[in-house]
Structures are given as C-alpha cells and as structure tokens.
Amino acid sequence: MLVVVIFFAVVVVRLIDIQIVRAAEYDAASAGKMSLPATIYAPRGDITDANGAILADAILKYDITMSPRNAREFERGSGDQTQKVSTEQAVSEIASLTGQKPEEILGSIASSLAANPNADFAYVKRGVDVETFRALNNLEIPWLYFEQIPSRAYPNGSVAGNLLGYVGSDGTALGGLELTQDACLAGKNGQETYERGADGVRIPGSTVTSVAAKQGSKLRLTIDSDLQWYAQQTLATQAKAQDARFGIAVVLEVKTGKLRAVADYPSVDPNNVDATPEQYRGSYAFAAPYEPGSTMKSLTSAMIVDKGLADFSSKVDAPSLMEFPNGARVKDSSTHVPNLTLQGVLVESSNVGMSLFGEGLSPDQRFDYMTKFGLGQPTAVGFLGESAGIMYDPEQWDNQTFYNLFFGQGLAATAVQMAGAYQAIGNDGVRLPVRLVEDCTSSEGSVSTPALPEPVRVVSAGAAKEVTGMLEGVVTHGWLGPQLTIPGYRVAAKTGTAEMSAGDGTYSTSFIVSIAGLIPAEDPQYVVLVTLANPASNSSAAVAPVIHDLMEQVIKQYRIQPSTSNSPYWPVTY
Amino acid sequence: MSLIAPVRRPDLQPRRHLVPVATSTSLSASDSGVLAARKTRTRRRPRAFFAVVTAGVMFGVMVAQMLLSVALESGAYEIAHLQSANKEASRSYQEMTEDIDRLASPQHLALNAEALGMLSNNTPAYLRLSDGAILGAPTSGAGFARLVSSDGGTLVPNSLLANVPLVTSAPSSARGESMSTSGAPTLVAPAAPVALANGLPGLATH
C-alpha cells in the first residue's frame, strides 16, 4: 500500500514539475524545435515636401553573398533543357550585372578559400537594387545567396539634402531631420514565429505574432521641393562663378513662418554622402552664424521708429567717418553727402548715420528688441547642430561694440535667424516661430504637429510698415536698384557686407555678403535672404542676381500678382 | 348570431387530470404476452441502431477531417504561392515607384526641358480680362536664360539619375522599336543640348 502511495506521489511531483514549474522552459524548447522565428519588416516613414513630393523613401536593397566552397560547376534548367555552367561563366554573368570585374569575384573566392578551405560565406556586392537582385536571382546559381536590407532612397538627390540628413547602412539615422525627427520616422520591426513542413511551406494557422510591427510615420516638411531645387541651382551657379566658400538661400513665408526653401552650397546628395566633405553635410543656414553686417540696419531702424526717435524723413548730419565722444570710431564703406534722412541712411548704408540715430536707444532696450527679433537664441525649428548665434549682454559691450551693433558687427546670427527677423518686419511687427516641419502622420492616420512657441510682438505695425517702405527706397534709390528691380513688382531689400571672423577673435580679409528682401513690398508675402561667404568680388552685388532670380521664381511659384500701387519714393537727402 | 352557441373543438377540450387506467387484471394473458414481446423488441433495436449511427458519425468525422486537412494543405500551397507572388509584385512596385520618383525629380525635369529647347520666363506678366490691362512688364524670349549649366549637368547632383538618359538622346526612329521589343529605355549617353540657332522654336506662333 505504501509502495503504491510513494509511486503515485513521485508521479504527481514529476507531473507538477513538468506541467507547472518548468512549463515555460519546456514550451520554449518544443517551440524552438518546431517553429521558426521571422522578423516582420516595418518600413521607415517617408519624408515629403509641403505638396507631398517624396524626398526620402524606404526601399529594400539586397546584399549578395556566396558560399566560396560550393562555387563550382552546376546544372541550370530542368528536364532535357539542362546545361552545365562553369564557375567562370557564372562569375562573369554576375559581374556583368553588378558592374564588377570577374577577376574581383574570382579573387574573393580564392582568398576566402585560402583563409579557410571550408569558407561558406563571402560578400559579392552589398546594397544592390531590386532590378539587379532580380536579374541575379534569375541566374539560378545555387551558391549565390541574397539578404534583404532595409534601406533609404532620396529620389530628388541633393534637393534639400542638407536638411534631410541620411541614414547609415544599418538603417540608423545619422544626420539632419532623419535624426532629429527619428521618433516620427522610425518604424518598429515585429517578430513572429511559424511552423513549416518538410517542403518549406508554411503550415496554415501556425503563425504566432509575438511583437506587432509598427510602420514609421510620414514626415511632411514646409519645404517646396521645386523652389528648393531652383534656390539650390541658382545659388550654386553664382557661388561657383564667384568662387564662394559657402552660400545660403532662404525663402520664408511671412504670414505663417514656414520655410519654403533652405538652400545650402555646397549641397550633399544623401544617396551618396561620401562625395561631400563632412563639414558640408549639415545645413549652414542653421549651423553657421555670421556677422549680419548692414542687413542689421533694418532691425535698428525698426527699433528707432518704434521708440518714436525718428521717422523716414528725420534728418541727420552724417560724415563718412566719425569719432564718437566715448572714443569709438565709425567709418562708412563709401563716401556720401552728409545731409541724409533716415531713408537716406539706409540707402547709403551709412554706419555713422545709423549710429547717430540709434544713440537714443539704451543698451537694455536694444538687447530687448534684438531678443524679440529672435537673435541670440535658436529658432523654433531645433535643427541638428543649430546655432543660437552670438549676442552679448549689454554689460559686456565695450564702447566700440555699442556702435558696431547698430550695423551688424559684434554679434552673429544664422541666416534663418535673420530671415525670421525680416519676417517680423514684413508681418506688421509680429515675429512667428520659424517652421520646417509641417506635421507627422502615423500609418493609422493620426496627425501630430510640432509644438510651437507663441508669436512675439517686436515692434508696432506702423513702425514695421515704415521700415518696409524705407527698404523699398533702398531698391528704388540704391546702387543695386537696377539689379534688384522686378518689373511690375514692388521689392523691399537691404544689402549687407560684413567682415568674416578669422576664428581667433580677429577679422579675416574675407567678407560675407548678403541681401535680405521682402516681396511684394506693399503686403509682404515672402522673405528671401541670400548669403555668399568670401565671394571673389567681395561685394553684396555678388548675391544680387541670385536674390533677383529667386524672388522672381517665388512670384511665379506662388502666383503673386503684380503690384497695383507705386513705391513711396521718400527723399534721401534734405 | 345568438343561434350559434360556442362549441369547443374536441381537441381543445380540457383534459381530465384523473383518468381511468386499465389494470393488469383487465388484460388477457395472450394480450400481455404480445405486449411484452413487443416491448423487448423496441428496446433492443435502438442499441444496435445507435451503435451503427455512432460508428458512422465517427467515421464521417474522420473522413471529413481528412478531407478538411487535405483541403487546408492544398490551401497552404496556394497561400505560399500567393505570398511569393505578392512579394514579387511588391518588388515590381518598388522598382517602378523608384523609377517614377527619380524621373519626377526637378533635376531630371529641368535637364530634359532645356534639352527640348524650353527656357524659363522670369518676368511674369498678367492680362486682366475685365479691362484688358497688362499687369507686370512682359519681355521677349530673347532675354530668357538657361537654368542648368550648358554642359548638360545640374549643379544640384542626384546620383540616382546617373544612368538615366535625356529624352533627346534616343534617336526617334529607334525609340519606338526599342519600346516595342523590350519596353525598357535604352541607355544612351546624354547628348549635347539642342542648339538654337534662330532663337526659340516655341515663339514662332501665329
């Protein structure tokens, strides 16, 4: 009786052990013998421009591998149609499709076998496209294998390449928007297991999905790819002609704060990143602050008019060179008549005149205005490696800086920051957060838009309008007028030529030239800003053809109607 | 109407709860013998019947299950076949989408447009229909400039277009032939842009 009880007790204990205690372990072991794991590929989300044109696309590429020890003659075809194919013939067939030399592949086989006579793995070519993969697959070479690699294609090449960034061969984001917007774009691969029969066919009903795949979301930018291309093409043409070190062109929509084009020269083709030196793979428009020079005078004028210190007709006696009571020396780049109005100071781009008008502003007021204009802080875009620019507190200003800041030396701003400041002038004095990302749409259709700071009132609407009018005078009266005029349209613009930092606290001999414009001047719709670093002519005339053509393209692209009113023609002298 | 008295249908007449029952004594001996024999017969027949039915049903279930699994298995091959067809189709889709997207790139369009002799008009003008006023300043096509560089290249590189020929580079006679035979575009090295000796061909309108 006792024996029977012990026997059953042992059986029960063992049963509990198998069924309950180690159930999971046995389940896993049995599943491991029966079922196969598989990855459900979740593609990375597309990046599109504002109109839905694909800028970045998830594709599959293929790594071609081979088994060197099995690389020998084989029979191709079936039934009576078989024919023998030698290794040499197979290799030359492969090479003709992959664009390699047959010796390259034969050499790879030989070296693999030399290292290990049983070598079972070697790459033939990595990352070939579908077309090549299919052709290779059709060769029916038994020792050739294929591995599917999730990859990325940028159909427009270097159009917006500096903004998009790129992904590595393993699918990780390595730069630009690909990296900063990875949370939106990244897909999450799933896991499933299934069982299959002896002939490799999946047994119905055996599939178990352990982790569901989640497709990446679609990122829509505010960029217009056609305008972006035009900006890059026009900028590159002139940058090459002027042998410029780098160039930037920005188109910003005044009423929305959306960037429609951010062109960088040199540009990078994300399909072929290695062709571009590493320093040019990001966007200088966001990352490279420069001293804005005379384009800053529009901002200073807005402060002066907003504080009621002067209007367009206010008079000043401005010599071309002046030593101020605090010891600061201010010099103009060209000689001019001394009896200038504020309009005249902008037309002649007189540093002395601007300093004399601006003296009435306290350093704190100026710092407050500059902060409201968006200087000294990164834009709302938050681009990878974006610079906040350089702006010192008023306590740090020395006597010279006090005056230099009026005409854009002694501080540094990025091209996008300056475009944002002009946006405020064009938008009746209200600065909107700059936007590069429109929205992110998940595969289920839910749309999320980036969180944005509140708009900032910088100057009064009246002051903004008056400054726009004076900038129009820069075109109608100024020396670059003929190059900036667009028949039928009112254009407001300001040139700027600034010395470039040598990188050691002193100025180099090179200049950075820029022009910022607003079109149409009577009701600004777009800010267009073009910058060239170290052009051969060392003059803002170097950027005039670019901004002229770009403004015309903006007019065509967005169907801006010709102006029906005339420019103000305010007096330059008294 | 009162002539017709309500009469119950016989089957709906209330049943008495207590009814007379024939006692065994009231049956004759021969009657009870027949009854007993009939009783045993009806009790035996269902057993055999149900055994046969049960066996039959089990057999039927087995056959159905076999048929079902055969059908399922052949379905598995169909599924596997369709899945691989689906994979092939998605590869074709990717191939074609890639082609369309790169052909739709601004570089490709601009290069081809200029190869065909098109130039960009940078001074738009409008004709207002209400009063015939011309807004803007229309200019002649003589001043139009090329956008892409004259060597046929673009300064905004796109490595995906490396092997894509310009529409003008395939001779028109051979184009139809190659399209009808292979359907694939022939790879021809980009030719020099069309020379425009007498200005724009598009402006000679009447």
Image (spheres, coloured by chain):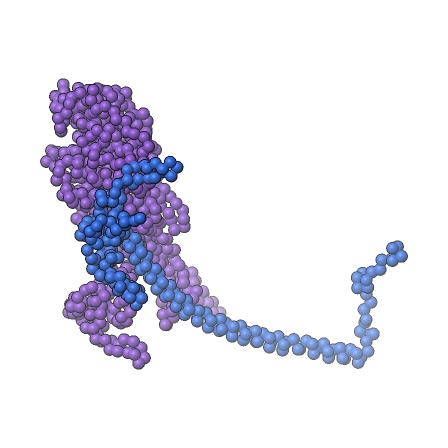
Chain colours: A purple, B blue
Compare residues A565 and B57 and report the one nearer the observer: A565
- What's the residue at 84%, 60% (across, down)? B7
Quarter where residue A374 is shown: top left
**A551 versus A145 height, above or below:** above
Residue shown at 25% from the left, 63% from the top: B186
Instruction: Establish if A409 lies above or below A236.
Output: above
User: With respect to residue A347, does A278 lie above or below?
Assistant: below
Query: A80 left or right of A294?
Result: right
In the displayed structure image, the side of residue B3 where residue B50 appears, left or right: left
x then y, percent, for residue A134? 29, 65
Q: Which residue corresponds to the image point at 18% horizontal and 71% vertical from the top-left?
A: A117
Q: In front here: A433 or B69?
A: A433
Is residue B149 shown above or below A389?
below
Please tell me in which quadrant of the rendered image residue A119 appears: bottom left
Give the image location of residue B169, x and y in percent: 23, 59
* Residue A67 screen position, x and y as percent: 23, 69
User: Residue shown at 49%/69% (left/top)?
Assistant: A1
**Residue A323: percent from left, percent from top:** 12, 21
Q: Is A323 in front, or is A204?
A: A323
Q: Nearer the viewer, residue A116 or A345?
A: A345
The image quadrant where one finds the N terminus of chain B is bottom right
Residue B16 shows up from this direction = no
